[in-house]
Image (cartoon, grey):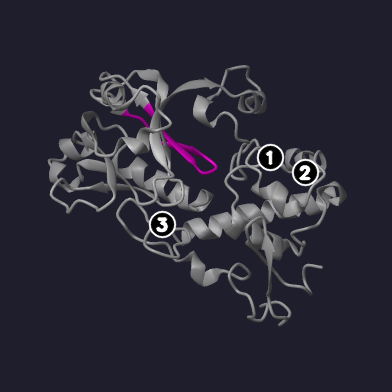
Amino acid sequence: MPELPEVEVVRRGVETWAARRPVLQVQVHDPRSLRRYAEGPEHFRRELVDRTLGVPERRGKFLWIPLNDQYGAPLEQTLMIHLGMSGQVLVEAADAPLEKHLKITLHLGALPHLEEQGAVEEAPDQLRFVDQRIFGGMQISPLVPDPVLTEGAGDGVPRLVPAAAAHIAPDPLEPVTTAERFFRTLRGRRTGLKRALLDQGMVSGVGNIYADEALWRTRLHYARRTETITRAQASLLLSSLQEVMGDALAAGGTSFDSLYVNVNGASGYFDRSLQCYGQAGRPCSRCGTPISREKFMNRSSYFCPRCQR
C-alpha cells in the first residue's frame, strides 16, 4: 500500500497540474469507487462541476483537494482521494489512451498562468482516478475543525481538515508532531513499537516499509515495548522517520511495481536505497549480519538481529 511519501509525490504533482483549475465535467465510470460517498454519482458530479480545485493537502496517506466556487472563494468542503492499495491519480491529455481500470475522470479547464502565456495546450486536461483493486476511492467531505492543529497553531483560529480524515493523527512531517508529543504518544500506550507506528490513530502515514527503515536507522527492535522508550530514543526515532521519508520523497517514493506512480505515470526509485525492508538474508550495511525476516501482523518485519536487539 502507498505510504506517506508516495501520496506526497502525488500531491505535489496534482498541485503542479490541477490546482486552481475549474472542473468542467465529471465522468464516473465505476460507481464502486464512490462507495464511501453515500449521496451517489449524480450528487458527486453536481458538487464538482463549476468548482475550482484548490491547492491539494495531505495527512498521512489521505489526500484532499479543497474546493472553491467559480469565483475562487473557498467552500467548506473538499474532494477526498484515498489511493488504497492500487489507486492512481493521473493528469493526462484527453487523447491519451484510457487506462484499463479507469474509475473517475475530471475534465479540467485551463491553468490560468499557462492561458496567459498562450500555452494552454501544454496543460493536460484530465485528472483520472485509476484503481485496479478498488480499495481506494473518492468522496466529497465537509471540513471540520482539528483540535490538535488548532492548539498547535496557538492563535485560536480553527484549523480545518476533512471530516473523513479527522480520525487519524498528524503525520511525522507535520510541524505539530514534535519530539515531545511523539514521546508522550508512545509512552501513553502499552504495545510493541512497530504496532504503534502502524496505528494511524497515533501517528499517520507510516506503513511497513518506512517503519522498518526508520527502526533500522534508530537501532530499535520492532517488538520493543513503547512504555520503555526514552525521550532521547523517541526523538531519534521521529528524526529517522522524517529523514527516511525525506529521502524517499527525493527519489519519487518507493515503487515495487507499476501501481505506485506519480501523476505522469513515472515510478519512484527509493527501493534501490532500502537498507532493511525486503533485504532478508543480505548483509546489514552497518555490521554485515544477515537481515532477518519475521512474520508480523499478517505481513513481515525486517531487522538486523545484531544492530536491533
Q: Residues within 10 Å of mark 3 (few under 14, many from 20)?
A: many
Residue 10 picture location, percent across and down: 40, 48
Residue kind at label 2, given as amino acid type: Leu
Q: Residues within 10 Å of mark 2 (few under 14, many from 20)?
A: many
- Mark 3 vs mark 2: which is more N-terminal? 2
Q: Are marks 1 and 2 in contact (CB under 8 Å)?
A: yes
Helix, strand or loop at label 2? It is: helix
- Report how far apart the C-alphas of labels 3 and 2 lie in the structure: 30 Å
| Residue situated in front as seen by the camera: 3 or 269 | 3
Q: Residue 79 is drawn in which quadrant?
A: top left
Q: Which disc, if any, is residue 279?
A: none
Residue 196's x, y, as percent?
72, 47
Using residue 141 as the reference point, say whether residue 215 is left or right of it: right
Region rendered in magenta = 53-66
Q: Are marks 3 and 2 in contact (CB under 8 Å)?
A: no
Identified by mark 3, the residue type is: Tyr
Along the line of sight, the residue nearer the viewer: 130 or 115: 130
Q: Which mark is residue 186?
A: 2
Magenta stretch, main secondary structure, is: strand
Q: As displayed, is residue 72 above or below residue 127?
A: above
Name the spot of residue 72 as percent of width and height, x first.
Answer: 30, 21
Give the number of the disc on residue 202. 1
* C-alpha gap between disc 1 and disc 2: 8 Å
User: Disc 1 and disc 3: Cα gap in Å?
Assistant: 25 Å
Residue placed most toward the observer, 160 or 221 = 221
Residue of label 3: 260
Residue 162 seen by the camera: no
